[in-house]
Image: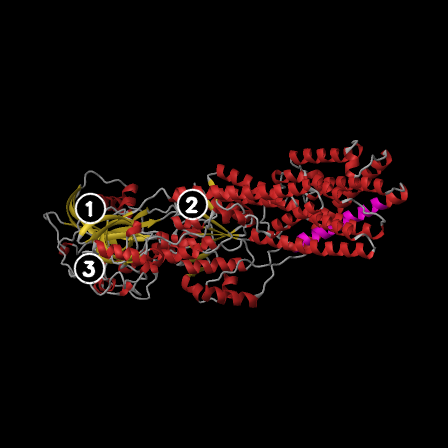
Amino acid sequence: MIDADGSQANAPRRDERTADTVTADTVEADPPPTYWALPVDEVLRRAGTTESGLGAEEAARRLDAVGPNRLAPTHRGSWLRALAKQFTEPIILILIAASVVSMVLHDVTDAAIILAIVGLSGLLSFWQEHRASVEVQRLLDMVQVHADLRRDGTPVEVSLEEVVPGDVVVLNAGDVVPGDCRVIEADALQVDQAALTGETFPAYKHPEPTGEDAELGERHSALFLGSHVVSGRGLAVVVATGSHTELGGLSRRVAQEAPVTGFQQGIRQFGMMLARVTGILAVAIMALNLVLDRPFTESLLFSLSLAVGLTPQMLPAIVAVSLSRGAHRMAREQVIVRRLDAIQDFGAMDVLCTDKTGTLTEGAVHLHAALDTTGTPSALVQELAAANAGLQDGFANPIDTAILASHPLDPAYRAVAELPYDFSRKRLSVLVDAPDGRQLVCKGAYDSVVDACRVTDRVTDRAALDAHFAQLSQEGYRVLGIARRRLPDVDAVTLADEQDLEFMGFLAFADPAKAGTREALGELRAAGVSVRMITGDNRLAAAHIAAEVGMDVGTVLTGRDVDELDHEQLVRRAQEVEVFAEMDPLRKERVISSLRDSGATVGYLGDGINDAAALHLADVGISVDTAVDVAKNAAAIVLLDKDLAVLGHGVRLGRQTFANTLKYVFTTVSANFGNVASMVVASAFLPFLPLLPRQLLLLNFLSDIPSTTIAVDNVDSEQLERPQHWDLRFVRDFMVVFGLLSTLFDLLTFAVLLHVFDADSTLFRSAWFVGSTLTELAVLMVLRTRRPAIRSRPGSGLVLTSVAAAAVTLALPFVPGLSGLLGLDALPARVVVALLLITLGYVLAAEALKRRFYRSSQQTPRPGVRRPGRERLLHVIREHGGVRRTRPTGVPPGAGV
């Protein structure tokens, strides 16, 4: 036994000599292999310590040699690096290059506007993410942990960081385990290691060696950093600290650079596509002008200005404003967004994987039922259980707490004597005075209790009892037995009295699903998000909760099942199976990776240490403020309230921000592409430049004014019903189809101006400047929605800015002084009427083409691009080299539309 101050009572010392086989110079940071399978004496010898603990000087030397008991920091880097990261995406680099070109063209105003947009959007993203990181760090800093040790045989308290291998730690209820340890002594020691293993119920710990091949949750002689003592007392030797612990291994994986998410990959691929198109067109226009014997300098400046005109200058601002607005709205829902683009990935999420314990469930033990031997609810069984739980003089534990919460102790019962719990018996008995006489009430593991019972009228068929027990266990309950023996003339009890008991019934315990979980998951499914449970808990408990919350439990894959599948097989099975049980962190990573490699955007919701690697790998990792530190650091989103309904809200918000981002991309790149194509055609037959560089840049600026409000535009309800993804092929097709439509109407405008109005260069440029701007502003109302434009209400900001930009466009040629500076001239009324008619025709044609385009895109499947050979190679690299695949190049059907 272990006294409260850490000294042992009635237990001989194994070795009081100072160990000299291991010193600070030779101590190893890594624990002995399979230390849980070694005898205690051997572990102490290898650790160079005794049960009296290390000496203070030796502990100090080891601290210098091994280092502080800290985990590897997560991959944050300096704030300067975090800020610089905001400006490294291809689309941002293109815009920076565009600003340089504008300066070369002596358009300082446009260069300043582009740089301001890029700078402010980057600063906004950096500020939001930095603020979220500070908030999460505040949550992490709220807890300061200390450890009770023996040093030189004397109890001492040190900070967690000062614990070293070889320290002997004294553990009591509520203590955090300060490192990976080997149990030396245990007195009814129960440890909550759910954060590591996903198990609902505390694990009993004892000093007897366990098998070398035991899974993490089955190593009953080992304790792990990150777990905590629920009840009992213990003495243990620290075998590993910091990064060398089981938790440290997970932390190192999380400390790596996060994989590229779906949204990040989409933005990068879009930027690269735009860079290729811009480069090709700029070179083609330059070559065409040189072939036409135009001046070299003028041709170069013109081609560069067209390249600038193709860039979506407002995209960073649209994305930043959309995401920042979304983050603020989510903050009102008690959600911290640590990485802004996670909001977009929320909207693109096809699959939500979630842990079970504490996420889908309450994370606490509840007494589900007290049943008699026939399986019928019994008040007597509940009353006896309350007497045993309330009158036992041992350590408080979750099982007894759950019993008393369900049925308070009847004051008519009084304690007389007790047989404490021990690991070998697996039961606890209390001699009580009850209303119907003195009796010994026994509670414990079913097999242990029923083996101590005699055959009675109540218990005539052991097979029937075993069948009840098996049924309850298969339904996911943890089942204990309850029995009694009448002892009217006994004042003290021995183990011999704990025989010939009368079996009274069963106690079924569970960690119930949270209220509203079934409804919340149903809402996600209705929104096109399938749900997977990936838990470390056992198969039966996982299946029971999964069925309770509405998941398909027809097939449940265990960790060992997953081990038998190669990568391609797991990619297929992960899309079919909804419940994965007995999963350690590496297996969870494999499932997440397989789902991502299938082309899905994957979210992961978890709060345990064993969830950290999966949170890190997922496109969007979601944790809660009560999660362990490493899980919060790995997550992109932290829920301050465990209400799962907020997930559905986050999905809708993500889809709204993504939809508005795509609106800008579609309308801008198609309009810009059309303008550039028109300029190429015009350059081929006009004896003058169709637009001056400053006119082209001003046109882009005016058409971008309404785009500043797209971030808060209304979104059609049907666009919120299904996940949305980047689909570069769709973006390219949209750009070409609607860009060429724009070019056709530009050519119509050219023909009218040249052959109807016999326009000179100034009138031509003035009219095309006005006409091109008006058509871009008008078609925005058509292309912002899949619906007929008159059936989709735009945001008021978008309407007002569009009207204002149109008014300015019409007015500019008539403003004295300014019109001359811009190279514009007043337009005759009949030219204005012609331009308005062409604009109307363009809008009607765009509406008709839009309907046909979307109908065609729905008939043509757009599967994700699969490269099985490459996936196999990546799987081998990932398994042996620790390298993770970032993202498949393909996307699911119908994505991006």
Q: Which residue is mark 2?
A: 624
- Along the polypeptide, which appears first: circle 2 or circle 1? 1
In the image: residue 478, left or right of residue 813: left
Say the numbered circle drawn on residue 392: 1
- Dot 3: element: loop
**CB atoms at circles 3 and 2 under 8 Å apart?**
no
Q: Three-letter amino acid code at disc 2?
A: Val
Q: Residue at x 65, y 34 (%)?
A: 797
Overall secondary structure of the magenta section: helix
Residue 820 visible somewhere in the drawing: yes
Write down the region rendered in magenta. Answer: 729-750
| Amino acid under disc 1 | Gln
Q: Is residue 499 left or right of residue 655?
A: left
Mark 3, residue position: 50
Crowding at dot 1, Cα within 10 Å, few <14 / some 14-19 / many 20+, comes out as many
Q: Secondary structure at mark 1?
A: loop
In the image, 97 versus 577, the foreground residue is: 97
User: Which residue is depicted at the point 46% across and 39% down?
Assistant: 334
Tell whether 259 sits left or right of 33: right
Give the Cα separation between the discs numbered 2 and 1: 36 Å
Q: Is residue 742 magenta?
A: yes
User: Circle 2: is it few (<14), some (14-19), or many (20+) Cα within 10 Å?
Assistant: many
Mark nearer the viewer, 3 or 1: 3
